[in-house]
Image (cartoon, helix red, strand yellow):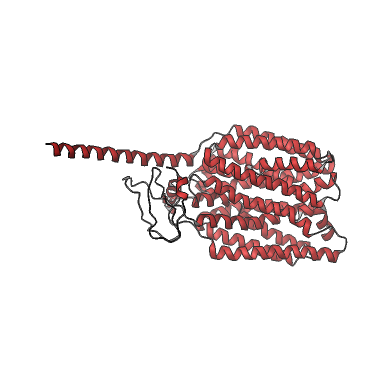
């Protein structure tokens, strides 16, 4: 029997929930959220090294709530850049200054990710969630106070607060998946966590061009911008309240043997510095860090500069620029979920990652070649193909990293991946922007294609060392061995009893 069978529904807090242990020592009947004794042991296997595991209904609430506040934060990453021509007019600044409203998300991440991952290891998921939503909420209200043409520095301060909140959000999907979900659903759960971030970007592409039309009257323009900021602040405030009352640190009983083993490590034996050192010495993981940064950095550059690229070839199409961005991200969300389900079923981490990376390169080449043809419907199609693979790659990188680095903290490995993405994102955005200004959009997109090709080659060189999967398989093998030994002993005893009766 597999862990999928553990997903049977039972009523919450039902005392008569039956606990059964199978070959992988996983509790077969998914009970409610009522507290169970913490000293539950495996039944009938006689192995002191194995612990009972359990799936809680509440895990879905946790991952969806995370997705929602991640959505709120990522929406604000792109809300300035997608209507950059409008904000340059309102605040009387140049295009490069508005580009920094996106790049501040990338820049802030780099120096703060290591303190934040240390805090995650010391204080846990709930503290990180509270700080993230509080900062995000504060940033949205600062923006509400910035809607005057001479207050650009205030709106930049609000964006900085939101970018700081992102440091507490971006690397959490794989951690939440590992802490709350079974081994046959961790990749799907990670994809759902990434899904929220992608959906926020999609809304960021779609909503600002609709809420803030390109009008010349500054008072009317300020009114539209203020409405957009008030809506954002209201949603962020509601999510902060929900996190305060709903978000939970972790389940009382771990969902997998791998997570149970990670929990069993005494705090005094864990060293954050040693963990970082181990990750930096892990050659397959460091290759993945670079390749992940190249891929996601290209996505950040495309998202930040999309308005400028579309307006060059299709003047006055701000709304359609947002819709093209929406198409990129919606297709990517579908790709993310498909890739997550595929990984849970096949465990082919390297093969899937390499295939998606190669197809991202193909998508970028096709997008670059068709952008200037003069047909928006073609751009919609090619952008959708690009998004399906490029943003569909995000959860693959997270999950592959966790496999390569187990039992190191998921937050630390994800943090290093995202740090690489931010560095390459800033470099690619600045360089591609300058290339577009001087040589055109085709040259700028070819620039990204070159680095995607390099990333594809490097991905092929990554050694597939699936440590987390090996840990779960070893636990299953141990339980199976103990069970077989127990059965042999039972048959021996039954044979002696039969012989005694005959005598």
Q: Quadrant of residue 476?
A: top left
- Counting from the top left corner in percent of width and height, residue 410 is at 53, 48
Residue nearest the viewer, comparing 435 with 36: 36
Query: Looking at the image, is 496 positioned above or below residue 92?
Result: above
- Counting from the top left corner in percent of width and height, residue 397 is at 59, 42
Q: What is the residue that sits farthest to the front in this orientation?
A: 502
Q: What is the residue that sits farthest to the right in this orientation?
A: 216
- Counting from the top left corner in percent of width and height, residue 81 is at 76, 53
Q: Identify the residue at horizontal 33%, vertical 45% (top origin).
A: 47
Q: Identify the residue at horizontal 57%, vertical 35% (top origin).
A: 350
Residue nearest the viewer, comparing 38 with 409: 38
Query: Looking at the image, is 183 positioned above or below residue 229?
Result: above
Residue 119 at least partly seen: no
- Counting from the top left corner in percent of width and height, residue 201 is at 69, 52
Q: Identify the residue at horizontal 40%, vertical 42% (top origin).
A: 475
Residue nearest the viewer, comparing 49 with 413: 49
Q: Identify the residue at horizontal 60%, vertical 64% (top origin).
A: 240
**Image label count:** 0
Image quarter of the N terminus = top left
Image quarter of the C terminus = top left
Is 445 positioned to the left or the right of 260 in the image?
A: right
Residue nearest the viewer, comparing 470 with 2: 2
Is 381 positioned to the left or the right of 315 in the image?
A: left
Residue 274 at least partly seen: yes
């Amino acid at each position: 029997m597999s862990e999928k069978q553990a997903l049977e529904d039972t009523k919450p807090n039902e005392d008569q929930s039956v606990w059964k242990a199978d070959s992988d020592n996983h509790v077969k009947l998914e009970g409610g959220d009522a507290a169970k004794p913490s000293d539950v042991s495996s039944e009938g296997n006689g192995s002191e090294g194995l612990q009972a595991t359990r799936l809680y209904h509440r895990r879905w609430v946790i991952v969806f709530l995370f997705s929602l506040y991640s959505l709120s934060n990522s929406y604000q990453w792109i809300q300035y850049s997608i209507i950059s021509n409008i904000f340059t007019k309102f605040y009387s600044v140049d295009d490069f200054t508005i580009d920094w409203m996106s790049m501040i998300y990338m820049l802030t991440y780099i120096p703060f990710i290591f303190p934040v991952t240390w805090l995650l290891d010391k204080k846990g998921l709930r503290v990180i969630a509270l700080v993230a939503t509080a900062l995000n909420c504060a940033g949205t209200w600062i923006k509400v106070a910035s809607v005057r043409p001479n207050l650009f520095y205030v709106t930049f301060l609000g964006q900085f607060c939101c970018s700081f909140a992102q440091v507490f959000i971006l690397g959490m999907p794989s951690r939440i998946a590992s802490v709350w979900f079974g081994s046959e659903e961790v990749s799907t759960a990670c994809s759902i966590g990434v899904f929220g971030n992608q959906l926020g970007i999609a809304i960021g592409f779609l909503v600002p061009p609709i809420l803030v039309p390109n009008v010349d009257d500054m008072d009317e323009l300020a009114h539209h911008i203020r409405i957009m900021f008030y809506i954002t602040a209201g949603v962020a405030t509601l999510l902060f309240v929900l996190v305060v009352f709903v978000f939970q640190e972790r389940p009382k009983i771990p969902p997998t043997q791998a997570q149970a083993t990670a929990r069993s490590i005494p705090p005094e034996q864990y060293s954050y510095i040693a963990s970082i050192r181990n990750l930096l010495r892990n050659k397959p993981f460091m290759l993945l860090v670079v390749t992940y940064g190249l891929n996601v950095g290209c996505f950040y550059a495309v998202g930040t500069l999309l308005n400028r690229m579309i307006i060059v070839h299709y003047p006055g199409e701000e709304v359609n620029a947002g819709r093209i961005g929406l198409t990129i991200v919606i297709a990517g969300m579908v790709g993310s979920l498909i890739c997550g389900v595929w990984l849970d079923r096949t465990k082919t981490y390297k093969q899937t990652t390499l295939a998606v990376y190669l197809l991202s390169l193909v998508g970028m080449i096709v997008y670059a070649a068709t952008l200037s043809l003069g047909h928006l419907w073609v751009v919609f199609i090619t952008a959708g193909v690009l998004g399906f693979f490029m943003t569909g790659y995000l959860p693959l990188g997270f999950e592959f990293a966790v496999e390569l680095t187990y039992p190191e903290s998921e937050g630390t490995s994800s943090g290093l991946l995202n740090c690489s993405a931010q560095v390459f994102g800033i470099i690619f955005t600045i360089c591609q922007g300058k290339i577009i200004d001087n040589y055109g959009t085709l040259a700028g997109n070819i620039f990204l294609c070159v680095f995607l090709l390099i990333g594809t080659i490097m991905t092929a060189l990554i050694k597939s060392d699936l440590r987390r999967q090996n840990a779960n398989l070893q636990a299953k093998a141990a339980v199976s061995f103990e069970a077989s030994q127990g059965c042999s002993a039972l048959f021996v005893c039954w044979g002696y009893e039969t012989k005694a009766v005959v005598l």
